[in-house]
Image: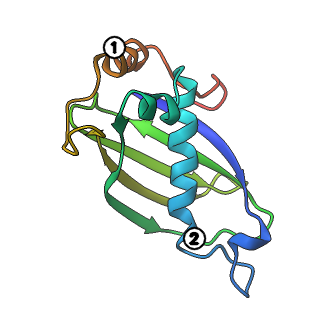
Amino acid sequence: MIITETKVRVYYQDTDQMGVVYYGNYARYYEIGRTEMIRSMGFTYKQMEELKILLPARSLKINYHKSAYYDDLLTVRTIIDTIPKVKFPIKTEIYNEKGELINSGETVLVFFSAITNKPVAAPKFFIDEMTRNFSQYSGLSELQK
């Protein structure tokens, strides 16, 4: 399993008139967590795209448990519990500053060739890095586990 955590501040632009995070912004928070998780393993979406591998979203499921508010500092926990093949499921949990779970969900990405415009198997270098990190890596400090 690979788990990383990314801090995200709620800005005024993220909220509605009541100061509550607009529900559509959670997908962006999920994306921030995914991007930083991939970066923590030593490569970026940009590098994948340069190799003509794209990662479009196939599905997104979101559960809203509690509201987040303007100026909250959220913790976006990104969880990979299976080595991807063609589909790349990524679980996300978002916690408020009190440590309460306020949002959870799953995004499924698909490895996609920019050349053929078709789904493809995850590239070997990606699988190798995921496998290497899978058993030993967690972006959480010992105190956070």
Asked if one can make out residue 102 in the rendered structure from this viewpoint, the answer is no
For the point 71% across and 55% down, which residue is it? Answer: 98
Residue 57 image position (x, y, % from top left): 35, 53
Residue 101 image position (x, y, % from top left): 55, 57
- Colouring chosen for the image of the structure: rainbow
Residue situated furthest front in the rendering: 115
Res. 86 image quadrant: top left
Residue 116 image position (x, y, % from top left): 20, 40
Upstream in the sequence, badge 2 or badge 1? 2
Q: Is residue 49 left or right of residue 142?
A: left
SS for dot 2? loop
The type of residue carrying mark 1 is: Asp
Residue 84 image position (x, y, % from top left): 27, 32
Q: Is residue 43 above or below residue 114?
A: above
- Residue density around tag 2, few if under 14, some if 14–19, many if 20 or more, within 10 Å: few
Q: Is residue 23 above or below residue 107?
A: below
Q: Is residue 94 left or right of residue 52?
A: right
For the point 35% across and 16% down, which residue is it? Answer: 125
Q: Is residue 16 above or below residue 92?
A: below
Q: Mark 2 highlights which residue? A: 66
SS for dot 1? helix
Q: Mark 1 highlights which residue? A: 128
- Residue density around tag 1, few if under 14, some if 14–19, many if 20 or more, within 10 Å: few
Which one is in front, 48 or 114?
A: 114
The type of residue carrying mark 2 is: Lys
Quadrant holding the C terminus: top right
For the point 33% across and 14% down, which residue is it? Answer: 128
For the point 49% across and 35% down, which residue is it? Answer: 45
| In contact (CB < 8 Å): disc 2 and disc 1 | no
